[in-house]
Image (cartoon, helix red, strand yellow):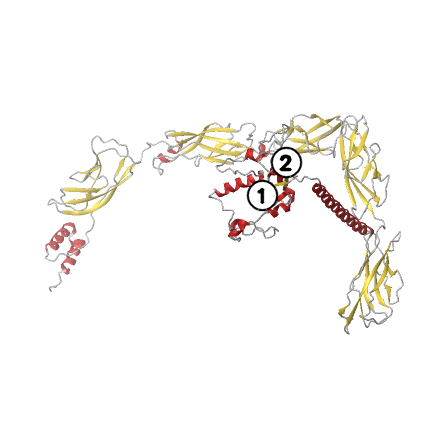
């Protein structure tokens, strides 16, 4: 029976190979299969036989040495092997028979396993066995010593219990850690005085005793050894140092440096200030010192405070007095809460000490018997003995004390020897109810002084009259008897509570007052009705009493408005009227004084005006009138900023100075002729100094190109409306105005004669008539 499919031959070949024919038959079957025109894929069974391939590290290899052989179960005459992988054909080589050789020394720490693969070929150089993977393991030897990375530091509290862990010490070994070559053991070589121990496996350093004392030894240097080969003598070793610091705890009680302290303090030592320092001795570090010092003998004068250095400052909390107690003795004790008991210095600690304070005498200022004084005085009275301010000299000398009041305007005085206070003038409570001032006490001789505050309250008396309050008092035309026209009230400036009583000071036919007894009253209609056409003003005079002692009364005229009212008594139209109240005497005096001042001022102005007129009249009749040149120092000051100068000298008529005769009786040039500016134009006419000045100014103005001409609207536009002579401008004048006769200027008096000369008057003797 023939099978058409070629896969049958493949199955038969595999069957023969596995069951009947053995290895050789299998090879033949494979050859048959390969010779088929249609090759098929099949799984080839591995026939490699691997031995354990190991190589010892650091073994010298001057010539390659064999470490194993490549073998296969296939009975084929193998002619050639090949290897691939890590170190193939360099570190490792293979011989024709499959022997594997090492060509050089290997280091496990550099590489511990090499991964290789091998192939096997037959005599025809055909592949018989495909690549198979294998490993070459480098066996470790103890060729490395332990290594510590660095030194180690640790700390532990003093007096820690046994077993307290401090620091873990670790070393490394490059050898195989799974073998004895890399297994380390730790031990303490020296140091620590037996107070420390180390775990040989973990390297943890811990306390072996509980008597560590920082005050004795603050630091220990330990030497730790690490050894491989599990600590056997044949193992390699290495050492390192471990620094162990002992940390402080509060295990020492604070102790006084001595059992007796002495200090001298002046009696004027300030309160809450340090007098001395009680030194403490404590071996513990500063942060762990927590002493407390108490004064065993209770004393309210002293206290102890702990300072930053953990010593005790003895403080003064009450004043010292040498004259009373020159020496004070107190006992102080120190306490401290410790972390452990008993304290290390329990046998030699000084926890109790005596402090002796010697008070030094000081010349002290006077001391008042009180810290402040308070007195009461009645107003409106001169009191000779308000009270006494007293001070003494606290020293043994007992110097005399003198008293004085610092405030100059104080309404009180004090006896400098006795300290008795009295009033200088009557007091008014309504103006100032309380007076406060300072009294100084000063010792004779030393001049030491002390001050004290004095408060004096002014006691009220019934010295003010009541004041009436009458608001909205009006009557209506149809008001009948007992109609209430308004309510009266009163006030009083006195402090005492007042019980006001109201009544009419003079009887009235139309009105009456009804007192309610509660500090108010009503004005009632006694007889009505009323008429607005009546010209009379309705008013009543009300008397008010304050009910005090002594009784004070006041009278006030109350004006009642007359109104036309509606049916609800709401005013619709009132007759002009107003209430008048009494004017005090002080107000009347002030009004009269103002009127008197005004009258005196008016009289003085009238006298001054009259004197000025008489003076001018006398000047007119004296035959000589001096013109005044007025200069203004500043603009806008008024009449008070002018200065007058006698310019009659300028009216000397002619430059020959006929009016300015010198003692030699010879004519001299006029003043203006001597000071006038020189210019080409000189007037030939004999004119006065004023005329010469005007001519000179006119010449300057005519030749000034920068200024406005005088004969322009800018200069004369608004000039002359208020002058009787009219405007001097020629803007509004005709051409014929130049022929006007100005002789009338001579009739205007001496002040216009110079102008008359300028406009045609040439009579030189005219100016000499006066």
Residue 298: in sight, yes or no? no
Q: Which residue is mark 2?
A: 337
Query: Disc 1 vs disc 2: Cβ atoms closer than 8 Å?
Result: no
Q: Position of residue 231 (x, y in %)?
A: 40, 32
Q: Nearer the viewer, residue 270 or 732?
A: 732
Q: Residues within 10 Å of mark 2 (few under 14, many from 20)?
A: some
**As displayed, is residue 501 above or below residue 381?**
below
- Side of 759 relative to 559 (left or right): left
Q: Which residue is mark 1?
A: 761
**As displayed, is residue 491 above or below residue 419?**
below
Q: Residues within 10 Å of mark 1 (few under 14, many from 20)?
A: some
Q: Nearer the viewer, residue 380 or 255?
A: 380
- Side of 186 relative to 372 (left or right): left
Q: Please give the name of the residue rendered at 79% of the width and 46% of the height, measured from the top-left corner.
A: 433
The first of marks 1 and 2 along the sequence is: 2
Q: Position of residue 271 (x, y in %)?
A: 71, 33
């Amino acid at each position: 029976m023939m099978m058409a499919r070629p896969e049958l031959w493949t199955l038969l070949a595999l069957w023969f190979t596995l069951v009947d024919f053995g290895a050789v038959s299998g090879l033949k079957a494979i050859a048959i299969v390969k010779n088929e025109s249609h090759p098929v894929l099949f799984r080839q069974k591995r026939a490699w036989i691997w031995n354990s391939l190991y190589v010892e590290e650091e073994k010298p290899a001057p010539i390659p040495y064999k470490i194993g052989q490549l073998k296969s179960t296939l009975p084929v005459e193998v002619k050639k092997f090949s290897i691939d992988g890590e170190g193939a054909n360099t570190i490792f080589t293979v011989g024709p028979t499959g022997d594997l050789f090492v060509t050089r020394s290997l280091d496990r720490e550099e590489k511990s396993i090499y991964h290789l693969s091998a192939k096997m070929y037959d005599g025809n150089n055909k592949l018989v066995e495909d690549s198979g993977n294998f490993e070459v393991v480098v066996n470790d030897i103890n060729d490395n010593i332990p290594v510590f990375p660095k030194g180690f530091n640790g700390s532990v509290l003093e007096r820690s219990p046994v077993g307290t862990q401090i620091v873990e010490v670790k070393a490394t070994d490059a050898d195989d850690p799974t073998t004895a070559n890399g297994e380390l053991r730790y031990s303490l070589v020296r140091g620590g005085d037996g107070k420390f121990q180390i775990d040989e496996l973990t390297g943890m350093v811990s306390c072996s005793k509980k008597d560590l004392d920082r005050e004795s030894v603050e630091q220990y240097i330990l030497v730790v050894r690490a050894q491989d080969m599990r600590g056997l003598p044949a193992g390699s070793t290495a050492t390192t140092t471990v620094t162990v610091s002992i940390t402080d705890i509060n295990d020492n009680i604070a102790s006084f440096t001595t059992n007796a302290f002495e200090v001298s303090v002046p009696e004027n030592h300030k309160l809450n200030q340090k007098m001395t320092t009680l030194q403490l001795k404590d071996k513990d570090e500063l942060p762990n010192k927590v002493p407390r010092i108490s004064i065993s003998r209770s004393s309210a004068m002293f206290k102890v405070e702990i300072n930053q250095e953990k010593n005790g400052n003895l403080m003064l909390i009450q004043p010292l007095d040498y004259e009373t107690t020159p020496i004070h003795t107190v006992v102080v004790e120190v306490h401290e809460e410790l972390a452990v008991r008993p304290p290390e210095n329990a046998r030699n600690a000084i926890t109790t000490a005596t402090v002796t304070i010697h008070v030094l005498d000081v010349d002290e200022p006077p001391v008042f018997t009180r810290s402040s004084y308070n007195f009461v005085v009645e107003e409106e009275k001169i009191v000779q003995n308000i009270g006494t301010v007293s001070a003494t000299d606290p020293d043994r000398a007992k110097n005399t004390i003198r008293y004085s009041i610092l405030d100059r305007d104080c309404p009180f005085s004090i006896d400098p020897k006795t300290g008795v206070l009295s009033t200088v003038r009557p007091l008014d409570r309504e103006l100032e109810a309380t007076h406060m001032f300072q009294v100084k006490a000063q010792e004779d001789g030393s001049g030491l002084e002390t001050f004290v505050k004095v408060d004096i309250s002014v006691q009220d008396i019934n010295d003010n009259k009541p004041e009436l309050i009458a608001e909205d008092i009006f009557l209506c035309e149809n008001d009948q008897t007992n109609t209430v026209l308004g309510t009266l009230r009163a006030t009083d400036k006195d402090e005492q509570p007042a019980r006001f009583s109201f009544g009419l000071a003079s009887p009235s036919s139309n009105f009456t007052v009804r007192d309610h007894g509660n500090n108010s009253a009503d004005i009632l209609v006694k007889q009505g009705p009323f008429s607005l056409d009546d010209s009379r003003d309705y008013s009543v005079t009300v008397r008010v009493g304050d009910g005090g002692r002594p009784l004070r009364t006041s009278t006030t005229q109350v004006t009642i408005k007359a109104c036309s009212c509606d049916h609800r008594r709401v005013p619709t139209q009132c007759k002009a009227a107003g209430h008048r109240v009494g004017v005090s005497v002080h107000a009347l005096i002030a009004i009269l004084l103002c009127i008197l001042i005004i009258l005196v001022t008016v009289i003085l102005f009238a006298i001054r005006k009259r004197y000025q007129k008489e003076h001018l009249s006398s000047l007119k009749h004296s035959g000589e009138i001096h013109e005044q040149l007025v200069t203004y120092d500043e603009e806008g000051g008024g009449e008070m900023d002018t200065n007058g100068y006698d310019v009659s000298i300028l009216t000397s008529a002619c430059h020959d100075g006929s009016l300015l005769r010198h003692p030699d009786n010879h004519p001299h040039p006029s003043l203006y002729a001597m000071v006038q500016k020189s210019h080409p134009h000189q007037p030939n006419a004999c004119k006065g100094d004023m005329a010469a000045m005007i001519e000179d100014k006119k010449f300057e103005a005519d030749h000034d190109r920068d200024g406005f001409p005088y004969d322009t609207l800018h200069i004369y536009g608004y000039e002359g409306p208020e002058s009787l002579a009219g405007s001097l401008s020629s803007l509004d004048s005709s051409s014929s105005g130049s022929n006007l006769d100005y002789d009338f200027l001579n009739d205007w008096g001496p002040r216009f004669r110079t102008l008359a000369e300028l406009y045609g008057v040439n009579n030189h003797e005219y100016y000499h008539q006066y």
